[in-house]
Image: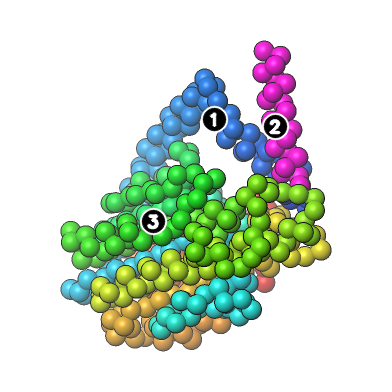
Amino acid sequence: MLGFIILNSTIFIREFIIAHKRNKQDVFIEKLDSALFTYTQKLENTYPLGFFIKLKSVVTSVDQITEYNNIVVKNKFNSAKKDTLKDDEIYVLVLGESARKHNFSLYGYHRNTNPLLARQKNLIKFDDVKTSAGFTHLSVPMILSRTTPQNNTQKFSEPTLVNAFKEASFKTYWLSNQDYKSSSIFKLYAQQVDYYKNTAVSIDVPTYDEILAKEFTTVLNDTTSKKKFIILHLIGNHYRYNLRYPKAFQKFNPITSNKVLFSNNEKNLKEPFTNSYDNSILYTDYVLNLFIDALKKTKKISYLFYISDHGENLYDTNEHLFLHGQLNPTKYELNIPLFIWLSKQYQEEYPIKTTILKENKSKKIASTNSFHTILDLSNITYPTEKLFKSFANKKFDSLQKRYFYRIDKTILKLD
Ligand SMILES: [Zn+2]
C-alpha cells in the first residue's frame, strides 16, 4: 500500500513539474489542473484502478448523452431552408487544431507553407480572426453552437449546427481524426449526427489527417441524400508536431527529436520545434487541398469553411512560451486562420452572399461568428437568428467587440 502511495505521488509530482515547465506564467490552479488531467490519464492505463475509472466515465457519459438528447429535443431551432432548391448541396466545416495564422504563407509567412492552397481559386481568406478560447474543448463548442465567452455553460444546453442542419433536412456527417474521451463534449455533439466515423488512434502515435480524405470521398459518394453537412475534425498541428505529417513533408530542417518533451534549454528548441510545426502546416495545406479538390470534382453547390480552434506559442517572445492555453493569450494563440472555398456552382446560386463574404474579408471576426455565418451561407433560417453575427450578411456588425474565455472562467476583452 505504501509503495502504491509513493508511486502515485511520484507520478503526480512529475506531472506537476512538467506542467510548470510548460507554462511558467500560469497560475498555480491551472498547473494543478493540467497535472491532474495527465495523472488521471496515466491511472486509466493501470489495472484494476483504470478499469473502474473508465467504467465510471462510461456511465457518466451515458447519463450526459440522455440528458443532452432531452435538451436538444426541447430546444429546437425550427430551422429551414429559405429556398426550394432542388440541386444537391454539400456544405463542409473543417475544424483545424492548434494552427496559428502566423505560420501560413497564405497570410504572408516567409516560408512557403501553403503552396497548394495558394493556387486554389475561389478561396476567400479572412485577415482578422480571433479565437474565443485557448483550449479545444472550450473553443470548438463556440464554433459549433451559440455558446460565447459570456455564456460558456450554454454549450451543455444548446443544440449545435448538427441539429440546425438536420432540422433543415440535411443529412449530417462527422468525421474525426481526434480521439474523444467518453465524457467529452464532442461525444455529446457527435452522437447527434446521422453518420459518425472516428479514425483516431492516440495523440502519441503518427495520426495523419489524410486518412479523413478517404472517408470524405465515401461520404461524398453517399447517394442516400442530396443535401449534406459534413464536419471534419483534424488533429492538424497539435503537439507533437513530428507525429502529424509523413516523411515526405519534412521540408524544413532540422526537426526536433521525438524524445524531447520540454526543457529549460528552450532557446535551442525554438528552431527545431518551429521546423517541425511548419512541416505540419505544409501537410495541412496538402490535406485541405485534397478536400477542396474532392468537392470540386462533384460539381455541386458547395463550400468548405476552415477555421482553427486556437493558435500556438513556439517560444516567440522573451517569456519563452510554448503550446497554448495561457491565461493571457499571446497574439500567436489568438490569431487564427479562417478561409472559405466556394464552388463555382455555389457562387452562381448565391452571388450576393459571395460578394458580401469578399467585402468582409478584412473585418474584425470572432470564432463565435462561425455558427451564424455557416447557417446563413447555407441559406438556412430560424426564428431567433441573429444575422448581424454572420459575416456573409449585409447586416454584419463589423464593429463588434471580441472576447476571450479563460481557463479560470474569467473573460478577457480583446478589442
Ligand atoms: Zn486545440
Residue at numbered disc 1: 44
Work out how far the residue at label 3 is from the one at label 2, CA to CA, in angstroms: 35 Å
Question: Given this view, does label 3 or label 2 mark the residue nearer the observer?
Answer: 3
- Judging depth in this view, the residue of 79 and 86 nearest the camera is 86
Q: Quadrant of the N terminus?
A: top right
Work out how far the residue at label 2 is from the one at label 1, CA to CA, in angstroms: 14 Å
Q: Residue at x 72, y 49 (%)?
A: 262
Q: Residue at x 44, y 58 (%)?
A: 209
Callout 1 environment at 10 Å: few (<14), some (14 to 19), or many (20+)? some
Asked if one can make out residue 140 in the rendered structure from this viewpoint, the answer is no
Residue 74, x across and y down, in percent: 35, 48
The amino acid at mark 3 is Ile
User: Mark 2 vs mark 1: which is more N-terminal?
Assistant: 2
Tag 3 near tag 2, CB within 8 Å: no
Q: Quadrant of residue 84?
A: bottom left
Residue at numbered disc 2: 12
Q: Quadrant of residue 113?
A: bottom right
Tell me which secondary structure the magenta stretch mostly adopts. helix
User: Mark 3 vs mark 2: which is more N-terminal?
Assistant: 2
Magenta segment boundaries in residue numbering: 1-21
Asked if one can make out residue 348 in the rendered structure from this viewpoint, the answer is yes
The amino acid at mark 1 is Glu
Q: Quadrant of residue 331?
A: bottom right
- Judging depth in this view, the residue of 205 and 250 nearest the camera is 250
User: Mark 3 vs mark 1: which is more N-terminal?
Assistant: 1
User: Is the residue marked 1 within 8 Å of ligand 1, measured from its CB?
Assistant: no
Q: Secondary structure at mark 1?
A: helix
Q: Secondary structure at mark 2?
A: helix
Give the answer, above or below, for where 93 lies relative to 362. above
Task: Give the side of residue 358 with respect to residue 149, left or right.
Answer: left
Residue at numbered disc 3: 211
